[in-house]
Every structure is written in structure tokens, then in C-alpha cells.
Image (cartoon, rainbow, N blue to C red):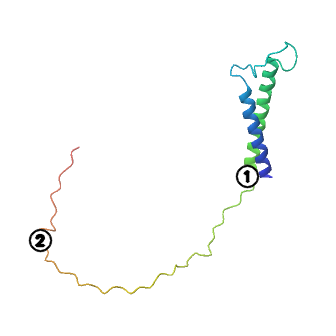
């Protein structure tokens, strides 16, 4: 159902883009000349495109709200796979290298003294 509504919304969106691009920026719509009477005069085309834009825009908004409601109602909580929880990965068993004796160093008594703290300028 959701996929069908998504396809319908895509078709409405593309029709809406097409109708909007056909309108003139001054509101004249299509700019079609011809006789002063009839449906497809410049004014008739502008009225038709204006009505089409408002109808398609309304359908797009209503369909967006319906799809959001459907998506929220059919949402299932995410499931976390805990089948591997607590298992450790086997590691390679290597023999530790023999410890090398560390040369002992005589501690210099002046090494442990810190420089006097200098207050920072404020």
C-alpha cells in the first residue's frame, strides 16, 4: 500500500512541477494567443493552470500527511540481534618474548622538582 501511494505521490509531484513550469512568471500562463473567446485563451489557460496548481498542490499535501500517518502507524520497533552477545573472538596464542632486564638508572634528585608556577595574565 505504501509503495503504491509513493508512486502516486511521485506522479503528482512531477505533474505539479510541469504545471508550475508552464505558467508565466507574470501570471499569464502559457502565453497562448488566439481568439478572444474560448477555453484556451491566454486568460483561460492561466485560470486552468492556476486551478491545476492548487488542486495538485492540495493533493500532494494530503497524500504526504496520509503517508506519514501510515508510516507512523505501521512502524515496528527495531530488533537487536543478541545471539552473539557475550561471545569472545578467539585470538592467536603466541608465546610471550622473554623479558629483557631493564638497565637501572640512578635517579637525579633534581629531576623530580617542577618549575615554579607562573600566574597567567588576566
- Image coordinates of residue 2 in percent, x first then y, are 77, 51
Q: Quadrant of the C terminus?
A: top left
Disc 2/disc 1 C-alpha distance (Å): 72 Å
Mark 2 sits on what residue? Answer: 109
Judging depth in this view, the residue of 46 and 74 nearest the camera is 46
Q: Residue at x 21, y 48 (%)?
A: 120
* The furthest residue to the right: 38
Task: Read off the residue under disc 1.
Answer: 71
User: From the viewer's perspective, is 76 left or right of 33?
Assistant: left
Question: Horizontally, is 78 left or right of 11 in the view?
Answer: left
Q: Which mark is residue 41?
A: none
Label 1: few (<14), some (14–19) or many (≥20) C-alpha neighbours in 10 Å = few
Q: Position of residue 91 (x, y in %)?
A: 48, 81
Residue drawn at (66%, 62%), measured in percent from left and top?
78
Picture residue at 75% right of the left edge, 34% below the top: 16
Q: Would you place residue 118 above or below residue 65 in this image?
A: below
Amino acid at each position: 500500500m505504501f509503495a503504491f501511494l509513493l508512486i502516486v505521490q511521485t506522479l503528482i509531484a512531477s505533474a505539479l512541477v510541469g504545471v508550475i513550469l508552464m505558467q508565466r512568471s507574470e501570471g499569464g500562463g502559457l502565453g497562448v494567443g488566439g481568439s478572444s473567446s474560448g477555453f484556451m485563451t491566454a486568460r483561460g489557460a492561466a485560470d486552468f493552470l492556476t486551478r491545476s496548481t492548487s488542486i495538485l498542490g492540495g493533493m500532494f499535501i494530503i497524500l504526504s500527511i496520509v503517508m506519514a500517518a501510515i508510516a507512523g502507524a505501521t512502524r515496528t520497533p527495531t530488533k537487536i540481534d543478541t545471539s552473539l552477545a557475550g561471545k569472545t573472538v578467539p585470538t592467536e596464542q603466541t608465546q610471550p618474548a622473554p623479558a629483557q632486564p631493564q638497565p637501572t638508572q640512578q635517579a637525579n634528585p633534581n629531576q623530580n622538582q617542577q618549575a615554579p608556577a607562573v600566574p597567567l595574565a588576566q
